[in-house]
Image (tube, rainbow, N blue to C red):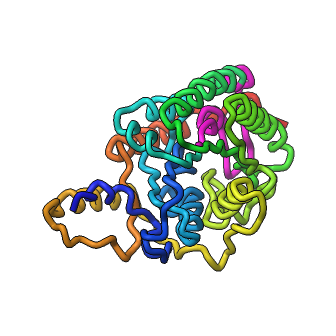
Amino acid sequence: MKRLLSLVSITVLSLTLGVSSAFARTENYVALGDSLAAGLTPYQEIDAGYSDLIAMRLGKMGQLSHYTKELAFPGFTTADVLARVKSEEASVLLANATLITISAGANDLLRLVQVNPSAGTLAFSQLQVDFALNLARKNMAELLAEVKVRAPHAQVYIMGYYFAYPNVHATQKVGTNDQLVKLNTILQQQAEQAGMTYVHVYDAFGMQATDYLPNVADVHPNFEGYRQMANAFLKVYSGSDRLAISTAELPKPKPMTFQEILEQQAQFKEQSVEDNKEEVSTVRNIQGFIGYARFIENVKANQSLQAQNLAHQPVQSVVMK
């Protein structure tokens, strides 16, 4: 079947959509960005994220012709997203896109925040953060300019970020939260200057969102958290709450490890391209992402490095109060 490549875009919503592709003729949706766009869970697996839930809602309404998050990737900074947008594999996807969401910027900031979950403390260097935020601003300006050129038919929405450390001590939250607010301000300003739309996510979480961020050692939300993000987008997209996704509509969790995704990709490659009778899968499949093998290597290397740092070096930085 000609659409073997679409196996990469058979997403977590295959059966969940419950809509014939004959009714899905409106949006060609491309999700760009970091782990939130990719759907990373609080336990370092991939499942349905906010972009999948958005696509689910549009699909149920008969307003989705195509959806992919294959250009999103865990750990991406603004520079990484910019590079991905300029890549050859992004060219056709962006050229045909009518709807784009972008999550970029959090990794520029949060990688500089040192967290001690057991002690409930946060620490960072203000000088490093100021430099990173300024670089993120420059990268976002270039990124949005590139997207405007490469996706001329798309409405583009820039997703804001939530406070990711609800479990630390109250006295530790203020300083890091101030930096997050600065990041969101940068994202909103760049979106407006580019004639794009900013989506506020912060208020849906607040600073006590332990129900949405269950793992004290991780910054990624659960399904309920991703639902909040999707609904924030859908409200801006539609101008009302009429498209809001309820908790009862959430798909059942079916997370996959990175190794399982690699194995699934290998199985897809073994399928015959001459099978013209192939039908769209009726079970949920996780998309393939470009570069997962490299990502797994990086994860292992980072885990090893973090273990060495914890063993030989205490956290010494500016402790926020």
Residue found 53% across the figure and 48% down from its top: 98
Viewer-nearest residue: 302 or 186: 186
Q: Position of residue 222 (x, y in %)?
A: 61, 63
Residue found 59% across the figure and 58% down from its top: 50
Q: Is residue 7 above or below residue 104?
A: below
Q: Is residue 99 above or below residue 222?
A: above
Whether residue 234 appears in magenta in the rendering, the answer is no
Viewer-nearest residue: 93 or 317: 93
Viewer-nearest residue: 199 or 247: 199
Q: Where is residue 143 in the image (x, y as percent from the top left)?
A: 56, 29
Residue found 55% across the figure and 72% down from its top: 60
Residue found 56% across the figure and 46% down from its top: 100
Q: Give the range drawn in magenta.
A: 102-129
Q: Position of residue 156 (x, y in %)?
A: 61, 42
Position of residue 150 in the picture relative to residue 117 (left or right) = left
Whether residue 116 appears in magenta in the rendering, the answer is yes
Q: Where is residue 52 in the image (x, y as percent from the top left)?
A: 53, 61
Specify whether residue 25 is in view: yes
Position of residue 32 in the picture relative to residue 209 (left or right) = left
Position of residue 9 in the picture relative to residue 120 (left or right) = left
Q: In this view, does 83 lie above or below 153?
A: above
